[in-house]
Amino acid sequence: MVARAYTVAFEGVSARTVEVQCAVTPGLPAFSIVGLPDKAVSEARDRVRTALSSLAIALPSKRITVNLSPADLPKEGSHFDLPIALALLAALEIIPADATEGTTALGELSLDGSLFAVVGALPAAMAAAEEERVLLCPAASGAEAAWVGAAQVIAAPTLADVVRHYTGQSPLPPAEPGEVVDTTGTRCLRDVKGQERAKRALEIAAAGRHHLMMVGTPGSGKSMLAARIPGILPPLTPAEALETSMIHSLAGLLDAGGINRTRPFREPHHTASMAAIVGGGRRAGPGEISLAHNGVLFMDEFPEFPRTVLETLRQPIETGEVMVARANAHVKYPCRFMLIAAANPCKCGYLSDPARACSRAPVCGEDYMGRISGPLMDRFDLRVEAPPVGFTDLDLPPSGDRSAEVAARVAAARARQIARGGLNADLEGSMLEQVATPDAEGRALLTRVAERFGLSARGFHRVMRVARTIADLEDSTDVRQPHVAEAVSYRLTMAGDGG
């Protein structure tokens, strides 16, 4: 008899159903797993054998064959332990043969039969719901998977509990979703002294999800400003929270199954590799740009990142998704993020500071900022300089609006954009022309600027998008000349890179 259980194999944020077939046949005693398993899956036979032994279940002196179908799909990860054990228990007639027909299972077994949490419980629950199956998972993964309301989730702490559940001795109750985590923090924009122009640029960037470049001397407050972005962004919508959490689930970043409604804020170090930023590795996992999906990717010391890493950002910025291609895997991840970059004006950092003039100006600045290619710089909607702040300014009282006040304006502006069909950063084609075309005076100003400074077509459209966001912040139906003028001023702050 061939017994069957079901699990999933992950391809990016999607999960493909895998049928686990188990046959116990006469022959020399052996336990083999076939179907393109990786090392972790192949070692499952030892964990399953020992876990069953802890339950006083001895394997027969026969040949046990486990097939993972489809056989040409690579199987990776320790989550195959539980479905292999279920198929084997069904083949040994310890649990009913039809008990696992409507169940998708995943979980890692310890040698004493305990079930350990595994990554990917959330996308696995989505796949189970689509096929109208029950999801069986470890107790530590139940709160995470239960967020998929369309799927019934059963969470078991041990393999013994699973056996008692399927034999009717002690049925397991459905799992409950974990509590929503709030990590907004208490950092406020008023903590930053000075930098009023940079604060305004930050508000515009947050309102329209525009990419922002900040350049300033060391200690001018660039990182301090960036750290306060989560406090002015609206919380994730339920759909966004689920989509973002699926990526974090694959990376094992969900804490105790709680879904975080705060937008992601990722800040990789400038020594990060291409696989860490874009995604990849042995399992073609998500990178920082995907972990920042629906949130913020802050890249401090931007020119210090390897040139090859920076250039890989160009396509994801435009398309909002990245294809991680490897010899045995082609995986697509979403990565619609807001890029905030910070840089010093030159290697020593004091090119723009008259009090501490750079000894190699202007060559030092040209060489340093020259590490950022023109096409990549062209993708920044806003560019702002952060001048040095004197120590005497630190004694001044706080200025500007609090983060809560800015957040209210940002939320209102985003609501107007969503009512039109999407955020301004995504406007293109006829929709861009329809909602972001300025009035006659604004159009004339934009045309003169484009001719004078040689704006690219991309730069021209990005100015239109920023002007539309500025108008939304003022609750203006039309894009007028002052909105265009402010948008242009951020575009030309660091002119000389070709628009």
Image (cartoon, grey):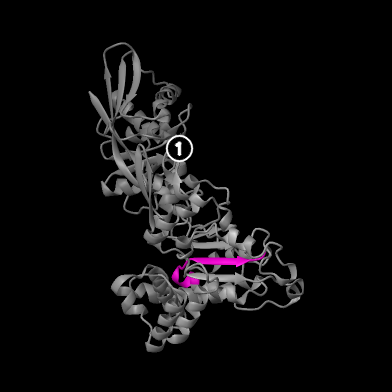
Circle 1 is placed at which residue position? 157
Between residue 334 and residue 61, name the one nearer to us.
Answer: 334
On-image quarter of the N terminus: top left
Q: Is residue 407 visible?
A: no
Residue drawn at the location 68% of the way across and 61% of the way down: 360
Q: Position of residue 68 (x, y in %)?
A: 30, 30
Quick one: which residue is furthest to the top in this view?
Answer: 28
Quick one: which residue is furthest to the left in this view?
Answer: 1
Q: Is residue 183 visible?
A: yes
Q: Position of residue 174 (x, y in %)?
A: 38, 46
Q: Position of residue 253 (x, y in %)?
A: 49, 48
The quadrant holding residue 9 is: top left
Quick one: which residue is furthest to the bottom in this view?
Answer: 441
Q: Position of residue 264 (x, y in %)?
A: 50, 58
Question: Is residue 216 within the magenta segment?
Answer: yes
Between residue 73 and residue 163, name the one nearer to us.
Answer: 73
The quadrant holding residue 368 is: bottom right
The boundaries of the magenta stretch are: 205-217
- The three-letter amino acid code for the residue at tag 1 is Pro
What SS does tag 1 mark?
A: loop
Q: Tally the numbered discs.
A: 1
Residue drawn at the location 26% of the way across and 46% of the way down: 131
Between residue 410 and residue 178, name the one nearer to us.
Answer: 410
Question: Is residue 485 within the magenta segment?
Answer: no
Say if 302 sits above or below 14 in the image. below
Residue drawn at the location 47% of the way across and 56% of the way down: 292
The quadrant holding residue 242 is: bottom left
Between residue 68 and residue 456, name the one nearer to us.
Answer: 456
Residue drawn at the location 27% of the way across and 49% of the way down: 130
